[in-house]
Image (cartoon, grey):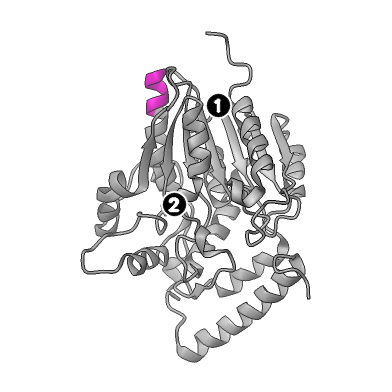
């Protein structure tokens, strides 16, 4: 039998899983959210400049400061050397980015972590509703424009602090978070990062995963995840609505990607990544003339957690201690390269 996380194994599981889920949804009449109006369009610049004042969006906006944004101040004894916006991956616990954040903050960077809607504490809190249920319900109603708008609001906060402190603005993103940060940069003229650190950014998927679009009408259907529970924000799985948002994001990014993204960028990727083809980055670099992008191939150590996907390269457990230490040393050196002596 192929290894649990091999492409063959995943392919078979995904195909059989899709077939079973479609049959189950049709049999139970469980294909919620079939309304055509749920097909979203990615926002233009005017749409991302603020949140429209619908009842749902007002509730979301009122809870942003407490639940979506969290600042981590520079922990060095020197004045801040930069500000970084950090965005996590799909159905990943936002606090799984904490190891990266700690390294950034310890190196003199103020960090703003964004928890996307449906992750962590970013859901509508009600005293009479269980938090796991409330989070999953929020996850079932996400869209790419909503996530992009959240990222824009976080970006404006990070940009303001960087301007106040007169320091560079960095972006750090993993998987879906990497895609959202890149798309925000590519599609919004006022957005700019000085340097970027990307961990397996979801700018392209292995062709097999696009089969997930056959479930797009069933937006509230929840697909169980094969990732370890310790990584999951929602242990019951990922709603089709979230995958729809991912596919919409990929489409939007492909439309807007250009040489505008050509700032110093370090991309970490495992060549055996189950979801993101490593070769896609070289092609993107060549096609869009992104000559300031650098690819760092991660070779996981023997001590890496064997239950984690190759896609997970965001902490010591998922890569092995020595590999992770080298990745973080390279990250900090890259962010502060060519920094003038003070």
Calculate the distance from the C-alpha at mark 1 to the C-alpha at mark 2.
Answer: 22 Å
Task: Check disc 2 and report the residue beneath it.
Answer: 147
The foreground one among 307 and 124 is: 307
Q: Residue visible at 35% across and 54% down?
A: 121
Residue 44 screen position, x and y as percent: 46, 45
Q: Which mark is residue 100?
A: none
Dot 1: element: loop
Of the two numbered discs 1 and 2 on the same chain, state the one appearing first in sequence: 2
Front residue of 12 and 34: 12
In the displayed structure image, the side of residue 59 where residue 159 appears, left or right: right
Residue 196 appears in which quarter of the rendering? top right
Q: Residue at x 24, y 49 (%)?
A: 62
Magenta region? 160-165
Residue at the outermost top position: 342
| 309 versus 71 height, above or below | below
Quarter of the image with the N terminus is bottom right
Around disc 1, counting alpha carbons within 10 Å, would you say few (fewer than 14), some (14 to 19), or many (20 or more)? some
Residue, disc 1:
194
């Amino acid at each position: 039998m192929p290894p649990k996380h091999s492409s063959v194994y995943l392919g078979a599981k995904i195909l059989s899983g899709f077939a079973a889920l479609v049959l189950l949804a049709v049999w139970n009449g469980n294909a919620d959210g079939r309304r055509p109006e749920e097909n979203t369009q990615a926002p233009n610049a005017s749409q991302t400049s603020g949140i429209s004042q619908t009842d749902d969006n007002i509730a979301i906006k009122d809870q942003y400061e407490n639940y979506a944004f969290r600042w981590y101040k520079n922990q060095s004894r020197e004045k801040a050397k930069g500000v970084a916006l950090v965005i996590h991956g799909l159905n990943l616990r936002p606090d799984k980015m904490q190891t990266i954040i700690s390294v950034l903050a310890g190196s003199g960077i103020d960090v703003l972590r964004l928890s996307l809607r449906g992750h962590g504490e970013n859901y509508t809190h009600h005293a009479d509703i269980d938090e796991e249920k409330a989070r999953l319900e929020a996850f079932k109603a996400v869209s790419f424009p909503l996530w992009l708008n959240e990222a824009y609001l976080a970006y404006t906060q990070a940009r303001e602090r960087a301007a106040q402190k007169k320091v560079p603005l960095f972006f750090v993103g993993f998987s879906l978070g990497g895609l959202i940060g890149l798309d925000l940069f590519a599609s919004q003229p006022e957005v700019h990062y000085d340097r970027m650190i990307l961990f397996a950014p979801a700018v392209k998927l292995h062709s097999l995963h696009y089969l997930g679009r056959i479930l797009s009408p069933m937006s509230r259907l929840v697909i169980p995840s094969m990732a370890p529970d310790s990584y999951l924000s929602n242990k019951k799985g990922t709603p089709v609505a979230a995958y729809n948002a991912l596919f919409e994001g990929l489409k939007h990014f492909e439309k807007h990607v250009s040489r505008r993204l050509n700032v110093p960028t370090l991309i970490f990727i495992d060549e055996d990544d189950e979801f993101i083809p490593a070769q896609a980055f070289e092609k993107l670099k060549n096609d869009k003339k992104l000559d300031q992008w650098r690819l760092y191939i991660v070779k996981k150590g023997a001590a890496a957690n064997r239950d984690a996907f190759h896609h997970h390269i965001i902490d010591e457990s998922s890569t092995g201690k020595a590999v992770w230490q080298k990745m973080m040393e390279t990250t900090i050196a890259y962010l502060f390269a060519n920094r003038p002596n003070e």
